[in-house]
Image (tube, grey):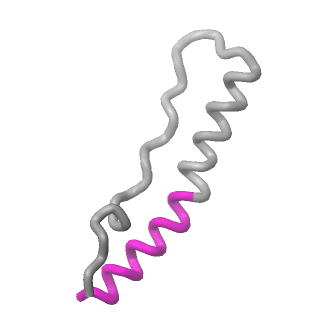
Amino acid sequence: MHVDPSVMQECPTVVDVPHRFIPYDEMLGLWAADRAISGDCKRGKHAAIKTIKALTK
């Protein structure tokens, strides 16, 4: 069974928050990006990677 290596890559790390005042609109963008990384990607990708590893052993 061949699995494309890109499927096995983990999600990016959390969003870096700048050390300065963050306007509300920018804060919303940072929050949304962080949620997409931490929530959607990590849950789905982690489960997929564990399944693929179990099936390819």
Q: Is residue 23 left or right of residue 5?
A: right
The N terminus is located in which quarter?
bottom left
Q: Position of residue 49 (x, y in %)?
A: 39, 72
Q: Position of residue 46 (x, y in %)?
A: 45, 67
Q: Is residue 51 left or right of residue 16?
A: left
- Viewer-nearest residue: 9 or 39: 9
- Viewer-nearest residue: 15 or 8: 8
Name, please, the residue furthest toward the top: 20
Whether residue 46 is in magenta: the answer is yes
Q: Position of residue 4 (x, y in %)?
A: 30, 70
Q: Position of residue 28 (x, y in %)?
A: 72, 31
Q: Residue at x 39, y 76 (%)?
A: 50
Whether residue 48 is in magenta: the answer is yes
Q: Tell how many labels.
A: 0
Q: Is residue 6 above or below residue 1?
A: above
Secondary structure, magenta segment, majority class: helix
Q: Residue at x 68, y 25 (%)?
A: 27
The C terminus is located in which quarter?
bottom left
Q: Is residue 20 above or below residue 15?
A: above
Q: Is residue 8 above or below residue 34?
A: below
Residue range (magenta): 41-57
Q: Is residue 43 above or below residue 11?
A: below
Name, please, the residue furthest toward the right: 24
Q: Residue at x 49, y 41 (%)?
A: 14
Q: Residue at x 63, y 46 (%)?
A: 35
